[in-house]
Amino acid sequence: MNRKLRQLIIGITAATAVAYAGASQATNITGAGATFPYPVYAKWAEAYKAQTGVEMNYQSIGSGGGIKQIQAKTVDFGATDAPLNPSELALGGLTQFPTVVGGVVPVVNIENVAPGQLKLDGKVLVDIYMGKITKWNDPRIVADNAGMALPDEAITVVHRADGSGTTFIFTTYLSQVSLDWKRSVGGDKAVSWPVGTGGKGNEGVASYVQRIKNSIGYVEYAYALQNKMTYVQMKNRDGQFVKPVADNFKAAAANAHWDAGKGFYEILTNEPGKDSWPITGATFILVYKSPEKAENAKEVLKFFDWAYTNGDKMASDLDYVPLPANVVKMIRDAWKAQVKDASGTPLMK
């Protein structure tokens, strides 16, 4: 083989290797944040990789961590159950869009109490988390659970230890049903809890409640189901006791007024309707409007575009509520209008 031919082959091989490495790097996307949607994101990622070969690596670290990581630009997208308001999005150069709707559910570990059997009123739940109701046979709990043998045992309260969108949804609801809670604790991703033990992530709270007798905590409904936990019924705004099931999350979400111009900011707790689950929430994705790594950002949008088209059944199987077709169209239109490369060309057409 002559010298020129050998150099040409070496050059082509090197160029091919560089191009392949660049393509591989662009197609592997990373995200971090909310634990609330982790079960469905993991399911989507598995199916997407099998169909496209593209990996979506998601760190379930809590909404607070997800917001920090996208702000630090260490991930391609952040995920949060506590939506950023329009001014926060504008300040950070970000846009956000919802992916699914789900429910936060109180879960308990009480001997001889089955899933969906115990009934709780919102104000009773507040007073348990404020340390004012300390035993399971408190008259206010007994009043809503006639005929149930509730133990004369101390209640162990479990809450999130990390900054959490699940906590945002839960404490926002508590603030809506109790002025006392709103004034003294408030609704946020992290609050100063009056009482209780903290667990990291939905996983941590679930683990504590499973291990500690006579405890109560709150998790995303998929975690309750997957871990065979004892969830409760809740009295909703219309005075009806309802179970945390997809149809009741959907009933709450029916009142949503999505607005792309406001970053799809929407709170779904304590919504009216006889079937509405009172602690319902959407979960959101954060991306930059002018991302530094445009190819990675494009892959993020392609992943969620695929999920909106192909992922509804997977979401429903995990008791999340897929978004209506008109909302998905609004989201896709928002991508075209808002997310662009350095030349101002939309990443999705």
Image (spheres, grey):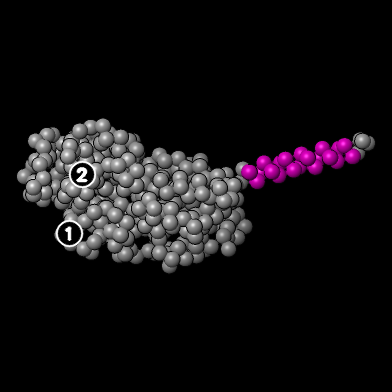
Q: Is residue 12 magenta?
A: yes
Does residue 40 appear left or right of residue 114 in this picture? Answer: right
Q: CA distance from mark 2 to mark 1?
A: 20 Å
Q: Quadrant of the C terminus?
A: bottom right
Three-letter code for the amino acid on which mark 1 is drawn: Gln
Does residue 97 appear left or right of residue 194 in this picture? Answer: right
Mark 2 or 1, nearer chain start = 2
Q: Which of label 2 and label 1 is nearer to you?
A: 2
Which is the main secondary structure of the residues drawn in magenta?
A: helix
Residue 137, image quadrant = top left
Does residue 163 appear left or right of residue 314 in this picture? Answer: left
Residue occupying the point 31% across, 64% down: 254
- Pointer 2: what residue? 114
Q: Which residues are magenta?
A: 5-24
Where residue 133 appears, x then y in whole percent? 11, 41
Q: Is residue 244 magenta?
A: no
Three-letter code for the amino acid on which mark 2 is drawn: Ala
Q: Which mark is residue 240?
A: 1
Q: Quadrant of the N terminus?
A: top right
**Which SS class for mark 1?**
loop
